[in-house]
Amino acid sequence: MRLFSLRASLPIVGTVLCACLVANAEDWLGWRGADRANRSSETGLFESWGTDGPSLQWMAEGLGAGYASVSVAGNRIYTTGNFDDSQSAVAIDARSGNILWKQAITAAPPKHGYAGSRTTPTIDGDRLYMVSSDGRIVCLNAKDGSQVWSRDFKEWNGKMMSGWGFSESPLVDGDRLICTPGGNAGLMVALDKTNGKDIWACKLAGDDLESGGKKVNDGAGYSSPVISHGGGVKQYIQLVGRGLIGVRAADGKLLWQYNRVANTTANIPTPLVDGDHVFTSTGYGTGSALLSLSSDGKGGVKAREDYWLEGRELQNKHGGMTLIDGYIYCGHGNGTGLPICVEMATGKIAWGPERAKGKGETSLIYADGHILYRREDGTLILTKATPEKFDVVSIVKPEFQQGQSWAHPVIAGGKLYLREQDKLMCYKLK
């Protein structure tokens, strides 16, 4: 298999253009897209991909340092980055790659390991929501970047499980904004999205979170919450320092917790929800599990472990997992990110782990019957989404690569977006 370099087809336009805020069905409005499932609904994307890959439409500069991915609404792209004076949100024109505005969300660049931003902005109409890596939940006007409201996680005794900074992308659910300060006065909180006022806080004493005899850490993890109706109760499922939890949407009550998946270094991947089931995985030698959620008969929910996979069988560190037709696709291994496919219902390995081209952690996205993998060294692997085999269509190198390519790829409006620290590459797919 030959490797090709993706070549630019259009220069960067030097004039700032007006961008509209009109959303459409091909938008990618936040972390992992619609339902946080990491699946694009677009079609006709890869007909002209070929062995040379797509053409580069533009490459933007001025995003700042960080590992945040991007959100897309109409002709605008949003992300976050670290600058000399702050951590900031950035708006980019999707037609030209020009920076439209930059707005600080911190007073100074936060200091923690692997410096840079993590949060992918959540778009909700004319507003953006994000969590700075030093622990502030911020709402901005999407049009001009002006601040609408903000709150500090210190109000809830906010705490991270370890020292790499808050990494959550907040969840908008109706009139609510859900985020995870990680503190005993608010492990998870629901706020009024219009003004940031309290709706409820999941308040826990130290002994309210069980450890099952396992060594775990208090505080927030590096994951982002998802919605579930498992067991007939609407809830927010989140991976925190002590493991996976379910919090009742109505009042913030802790419904259940699962500690086996926790490690004391970093609990990261966004869980996968499918009906009454939830799949979770972490790296650092930990492992993976499928849980079944059922009613406890008292308005609560019980979580039962259906199976456990040891770290040698399946562990996803931070590249994320995607569920397609009953099969989970992801990178396996702590630092290796080898592509693998697992049947969710049984935990059986369909194929892999594959010694694929490239190296390091692997993120991915599903679209149009294909899965596109992005390796830590920038290598892109386009495959057909099938549990039959690791079916490679082509392997290409991006126009630019620097350090660790950890920002997850995004497909929106017929374009592929690859964030690489201060730069953003836009490739035309259709």
Image (cartoon, rainbow, N blue to C red):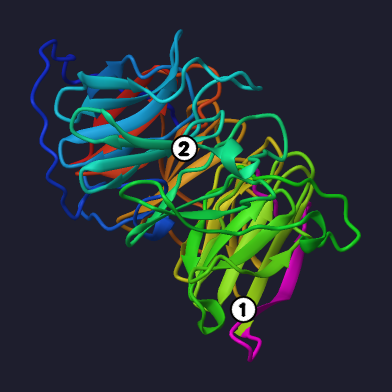
Q: Is residue 388 visible?
A: no
Residue 85, x across and y down, in percent: 44, 9
Q: Secondary structure at mark 2?
A: strand
Give the image quarter of residue 89.
top left
Residue in the foreground of this view, choosing between 299 and 217? 299
Q: Which residue appears farthest toward the top when viewing the image?
A: 84
At a point 76% along the width and 56% down the height, the residue shown is 205
Whole-number angstrom distance, CA of label 1 to CA of label 2? 33 Å
- The amino acid type of the residue labelled 1 equals Leu
Please report the bounds of the magenta region as a residue range.
295-317
Residue bearing mark 1: 293
Q: Which residue is mark 2?
A: 151
Q: Position of residue 359 (x, y in %)?
A: 60, 31
- Percent of width and height locating residue 166: 58, 35
User: Looking at the picture, how far across and down is residue 56, in whole percent?
Assistant: 25, 25
Q: For the C terminus, which image quadrant?
A: top left
Q: Is residue 15 above or below residue 164?
A: above
Residues under numbered marks 1 and 2 in contact, where contact means CB atoms less than 8 Å apart: no
Of all residues, the one furthest to the right in this rendering is: 213
